[in-house]
Amino acid sequence: MPIELILTIVVAVVVVLGLGIGVAFLLRGRKTKPGTYPTTRDENDPPAGGAGASATEAPPEAAPPAGTDGVETDAVETEVPVEEPEVEAVPLDVPEPALGRLARLRARLVKSNNALGKGLLRLLSQDRIDEDVWDEIEETLLLADLGTDATMELVDNLRERVTVEGLREPEKVRAILREELIKLLAPELDRSIASDRREGRPAVVMVVGVNGVGKTTTIGKMARVLVAEDKDVLLGAADTFRAAAAEQLATWGARVGVPTVRSDVDGADPASVAFEAVKAGMEQEVDVVMVDTAGRLQNKVGLMDELGKIKRVIEKQATVDEVLLVLDATTGQNGLNQAKVFAEVVDITGIVLTKLDGTAKGGIVVAIQRQLGVPVKLVGLGEGADDLAPFEAGDFVDALLD
């Protein structure tokens, strides 16, 4: 073979190899490096598919990214797992023990009800108690919203004891007045809140009342009382009419580690939310489920009927053990009218009397109990988170007479 032909073949081979190597490097440089974020595929890129893929073969159609519904996009972002930073746990509030709260807050009652207690003591400690004095005592009691029947009963009992025992010493008069006032408050009534599991299910507590009495706040404070008693609590946000009511209730619960069942839909059926709350409470085996309800005026028939519906729906799976009516102590006799209407719709088992520290009419406690035949179980004595206390007749009367 001539030398010229051999050299020509060698040069041709070298050129072909050189071109092949150059093309290989060029194609390699066009590929996206692993881990690049985001990634973009150009229409001129070679198809995926490994060594057997043809440069002229159309690339396979890629599945559209989630959420695009097949709409073409210029770039496809690659999901890269990101390690979430550790979130520092927020410490829960530690509620104050429920026992003795009323005694601890007695100073507030002393200030608010000073006129009633001191007025009675002053009148009864006079050297001579004539009809004019008894008239003043009667007027003082009526002004304190004690109610006509309770006022007449107390005055008659005091008349008899003062006349028979002939007492004038302030301490002895105070002792008699204390005994008679406690008797009016019916200390024998059961003031405990249903908060224990019964027959394998949680206790269910409904909270009702008119607009503006502070039901949601009261439930939040009640949750703190129960948590302080080592109860496992779940809240149901069945007030679906008031904006942010569910959020407010959930915030109260979160402070003490209590979950809240709520609807994400504004204006959802309150009965359905209540039903789901009780169902969740049964599944989670909590001690007590407390259901918040929307505030309603006692003269709104439709809303009152709906309150009865909530109770009936709950009772399809569990008994409603407690229906607490929240009343504003500062409304006086108007609160009695509210209580009467609510009692006709749902069986009231107890009263929560809020803003008791803001009124000098401490007699409302007696009047409400006599009107409904149910006890005052809790009293609100301020704006603080732990300013809700179990009602104790002895401590309450001592605050009136202190």
Image: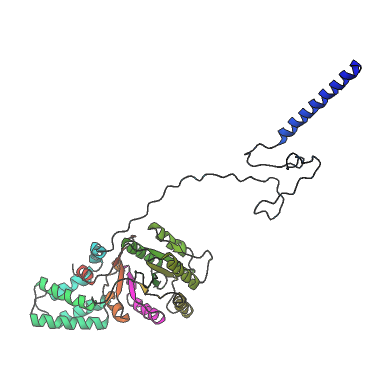
**Which quadrant of the figure contains the N terminus?**
top right
Residue 65 is at least partly visible in this image: yes
Q: How is the image coloured?
A: rainbow
Measured as percent of width and height from the top left, residue 13 is found at 83, 24
Q: Is residue 34 above or below residue 367?
A: above
Between 273 and 265, the one nearer to me in the picture:
273
Measured as percent of width and height from the top left, residue 85 is found at 48, 44
Image side of residue 163 versus residue 71, left or right = left
Instruction: Tell me where residue 39 sits by quadrant.
Output: top right
Magenta residues, start to end? 327-355
Is residue 46 highlighted in magenta? no
**Which quadrant of the figure contains the C terminus?**
bottom left
Instruction: Tell me where residue 190 sits by quadrant.
Output: bottom left
Measured as percent of width and height from the top left, residue 201 is found at 40, 70
Q: Residue furthest right?
A: 2
Between 229 and 345, the one nearer to me in the picture:
229
Image side of residue 122 versus residue 150, left or right = left
